[in-house]
Image (cartoon, rainbow, N blue to C red):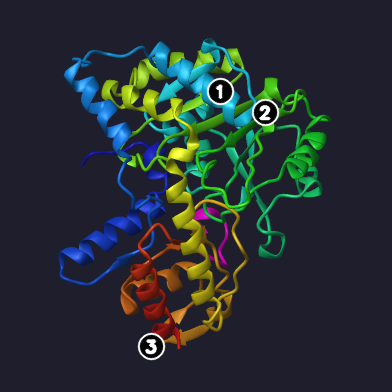
Amino acid sequence: MTQLSDRVLNMATSATLAMAAKARELKAEGKDIIGLSLGEPDFNTPDFIKEAAIQAVNDNYNSYTPVDGYGELKDAIITKFKRDNNLSYTPSQIVVSTGAKQALANIAAVLLNKGDEVILPCPYWVSYSDIVKLNDGVPVEVKTSIENDFKLTPQQLEEAITPKTKMIWYSSPCNPSGSVYSKKELRAIADILQNHPNIIVVSDEIYEHINFIGGHSSMAEFDDMFDRTVTVNGVSKAFAMTGWRIGYIGAPEAIARACNKMQGQITSGANCIAQRAVITALNESPSRVQYMIDEFKLRRELILGLLNDIEGFKTNVPEGAFYVFPDISHFFGKTLKGQYIENATDFSLFLLEHANVATVTGIAFGNPSCIRISYAASQEQIIEAIRRIKDAVS
């Protein structure tokens, strides 16, 4: 019998991907499942980006790419960082990866030693914790509340820091809560970190453009944080390019070089055709994809209105991304249609079985009282899904 490594045996399966797989299985069995579990825009990749990819194929881009990305793509990323975030990077500070997830894995691999602690404000993106543990780090979960829009406070950060703290990871806009940190809120966190100069910040900004409040702030904007912040981004969400698998970082040069070294032994450079398409995507104004953001905002208003009409669902107003993260602890300890609901996982599975709607348990994001519902689906699907949920819990 094959003996698998402790590393993989101790690693959790991605809850979002597991629920999506379960939903696909049920669909294959003929069940009418509405999938609100995956963080995937339901738009097509814009035509101007697809045309750039077709041109790259016709231009015979088919060879290995530089490990850290084409020079032209790095230039486009540098332009984007300056234009959108007022951040000035050099080519040696940029690394292109096979999605932002690989970028995060690289960062953990090159910075963490056994026992190093990484502060994760809860809720956090589902893979943060296991990426940290996979690299012998210790995730330190800091609970936030729906009343505070699931945001970390400076006091909470200060209380979580120990001599073993190596990094803090957060996303803004946040997956799964949709919370957006303002510049003032980031400055308050940065002020705490001034007393702890060795802590590195990983700022995951993959949802940057899906922002409903008209302004995005980056931790690296502050002069006293620039040299200790790794800014992670990519094209999956804003450009509806999830399957193209291109992410990137802007980082202190030593970290970028280390990520390049690590990636050179794991995957080498990212896909050549996708990289050529992303050059075109990033060189264009973000206004080219504003129609998607406008539609997501309409869907947010729609789904919040519908959820607020269901007794037991407690919501706040997410300022970005395309998720709602309602507190459903009202149902804990109750029996619905013969099924006892002990926690968010039970509730999420109950909705899949009795409402034919796929969501994700908040336990996977470090918050056992909530579920994540994606509204990256048509308005018709959202209306029908929430109708089913309301019927199931009534």
Badge 1: few (under 14), some or many (20 or more) residues near its Cα, within 10 Å? many
Quadrant housing residue 81: top right
Question: Looking at the picture, which amino acid does disc 2 mark?
Answer: Ala
Question: Looking at the picture, which amino acid does disc 1 mark?
Answer: Gly
Whether residue 371 is in magenta: the answer is yes
Q: Is residue 259 visible?
A: no
Whether residue 311 is in magenta: the answer is no
17 to 265, vertically: above or below = below
Whole-percent x, y for residue 239 in the image: 40, 40
* Residue under label 1: 250
The residue positioned 39% from the left and 49% from the top of the image is 14
Quadrant housing residue 6: top left
Asked which secondary structure carries label 1, the reply is strand
User: Alpha carbon of mark 1 to alpha carbon of mark 2: how far?
Assistant: 9 Å
Q: Identify the image quadrant of the C terminus.
A: bottom left
Q: In front of the other: label 2 or label 3?
A: 2
The residue positioned 31% from the left and 67% from the top of the image is 34
362 to 156, vertically: above or below = below
Asked which secondary structure carries label 3, the reply is loop
* Residue under label 2: 220
What segment is highlighted magenta in the picture? 363-372
Residue 337's tag is 3
Q: In front of the other: label 1 or label 3?
A: 1
The residue positioned 57% from the left and 67% from the top of the image is 369
Q: Are marks 1 and 2 in contact (CB under 8 Å)?
A: yes
- Between discs 1 and 3, the one toward the N terminus: 1
The residue positioned 73% from the left and 40% from the top of the image is 183
